[in-house]
Amino acid sequence: MTIDSIVRLHETMCSSFRDHFGSFGFIHVSPEPILPADDTSLLFTNATIVPIKRAIISGAVPEPGFMIQQPCLRVQNLEILLRDGFVPEYMSYFKMLGLFIHAEHFTDACEWVRHYLTQTVDLKKDTLLVRSSVTCAHLHCGWENAAQIELDAYPASYYCWKYGLAEVSGVGLTFAVTQEDGTSQDFGNLVEVRKGASVIGFEFGFGLETILARRLHFDSPFDASVIGALVPYIMFDWRTLCDITALLCVLYRAGISPGKGRARFVLKRALDVAVQMALRTNVGIEQI
């Protein structure tokens, strides 16, 4: 796809998300910088929950909740990008769209989420899959008429979330889309968030590039990304080249320079990987 067509897809998805949930009163929250302004527990902003952690901790979540469109950076791929045979499935840099739903509005919000996925995004029952557990029956209840339900196909830890906050954890389900080859590819989650034994809200979110790739039956989120349209296709190494190029761009744009310190070390490591990629693919480092 061309850059222009991908940008239009992104704009359409983002505006539909904002318009749909905004019509129910969700309050838009400005995204956090890639380098979190106040959260010293994180090296990089990695999820939609980051800008609203303070509100969650203090119990200041408005009704019906928050909506966020957050650029995210996760660097787990970095240490394995050059491993023989490794092909990144998910992008290190991506945009995440999400809600944090007030605990009192879960039933209504579930219906709003179902309508969004099945009507606005146009995911059909025979392709939309909900991966859940019997321990999360209250979360997938009501989805039977909109999706296929898969129960306890993974270890119990698959349905559990951690947030790096004292006493805050979650249990949840994962949304997936069945592809033309019969495999099911994940794209988002619905999570009940608890502080101790009390439910403090519910989180719904998905990766923008990921949901577009699943809906359009692309091979990977990279095919639905701007960086994927910019980087020339190279057999076997294309996704790796896309990932490291995007990572470098984001780190430099954030004002990071190579050196000592956690963020600077990540950039230094990314540069090392880029140089090795250049040697392996015959793509010049100046092109990257």
Image (tube, rainbow, N blue to C red):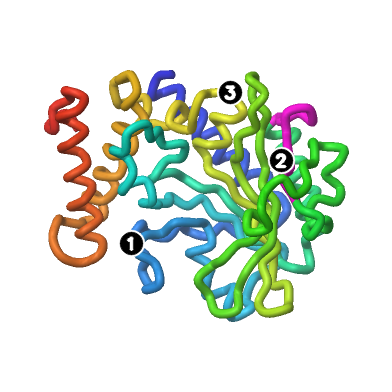
Circle number at residue 217: 3
Spatial separation of the CA atoms under disc 1 and disc 2: 31 Å
Whether pointer 3 and pointer 1 mark residues with C-beta atoms closer than 8 Å, the reply is no
Query: Which of the two labelled residues, at mark 3 and mark 2, occupies the earlier sequence position?
Result: 2
Horizontal side of residue 156 vs 94, given as left or right = right
Magenta residues? 122-132
Asked if the stretch drawn in magenta spans residue 160, the answer is: no
Q: Amino acid at mark 3?
A: His
Q: Along the horizontal axis of the image, is 227 left or right of 216? A: left
Residue 69 position (above or below residue 276): below
Query: Which residue occupies the foreground of this view, 283 or 37?
Result: 283
Which of the labelled discs sits on residue 116, or is there none? 2
Question: Circle 2 — which element?
Answer: helix
**Closer to the eye: label 1 or 2:** 1
Please indicate whether residue 195 sits to the left or right of residue 96 in the image.
right
Residue at 64%, 25% (x, y): give it: 179
Residue at point 61%, 39% (across, down):
186
Residue 108 can be seen in this image: no
Disc on res. 63 = none
